Image: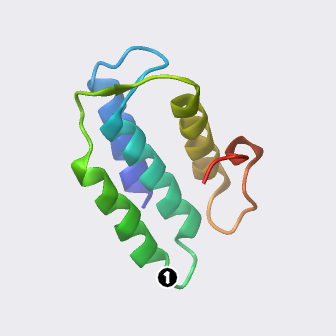
């Protein structure tokens, strides 16, 4: 699970994205990794992880996602990664699904 998040970080640094911009794939991988960490201790954690990770297959590494929503989603994902499984939802995730 943490490996997926680490892979997302490596992809972001090697993808050549500009500061404060994210490729669709990078943002999706970061979000999926965070969701995997956040649900890893739950009974259906593996299935949830596979489901959210599968959604990233159709995203593009070429298309950039800019804007406040992308930054908020990335901040939420980072906070989820830091807090780990079973922790309460971080304030950075308020207003995001």
Q: Is residue 93 left or right of residue 53?
A: right
- In the image, is residue 21 above or below residue 92? above
Residue at image location 31% in from the left, 40% down from the top? 25
Q: Quadrant of residue 33?
A: bottom left
Residue at image location 30% in from the left, 35% down from the top? 11
Point out the image quarter for the N terminus: bottom left
- Report which residue position mark 1 lands on: 44
- In the image, is residue 22 above or below residue 41? above
Q: Secondary structure at mark 1?
A: loop
Q: Is residue 40 left or right of residue 9?
A: right
Residue at image location 56% in from the left, 45% down from the top? 77
Q: Quadrant of residue 61?
A: top left
Q: Where's residue 48, x and y in %?
A: 45, 72
Q: Which residue is farthest top? A: 18
Q: Where's residue 45, x and y in %?
A: 49, 76
Q: Where's residue 88, x and y in %?
A: 76, 61
Task: Please rate how many residues cluster around mark 1, counting C-alpha atoms within 10 Å: few if below 14, some from 14 to 19, many from 20.
Answer: few
Q: Is residue 19 left or right of residue 71?
A: left
């Amino acid at each position: 699970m943490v490996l997926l998040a680490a892979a997302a970080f490596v992809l972001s640094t090697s993808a050549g994205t500009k500061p404060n911009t994210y490729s669709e794939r990078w943002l999706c991988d970061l979000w999926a990794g965070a969701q995997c960490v956040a649900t890893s201790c739950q009974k259906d954690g593996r299935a949830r992880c596979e489901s959210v990770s599968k959604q990233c297959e159709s995203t593009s590494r070429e298309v950039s996602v800019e804007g406040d929503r992308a930054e908020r989603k990335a901040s939420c994902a980072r906070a989820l990664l830091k807090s780990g499984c079973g922790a309460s939802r971080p304030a950075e995730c308020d207003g995001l699904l």
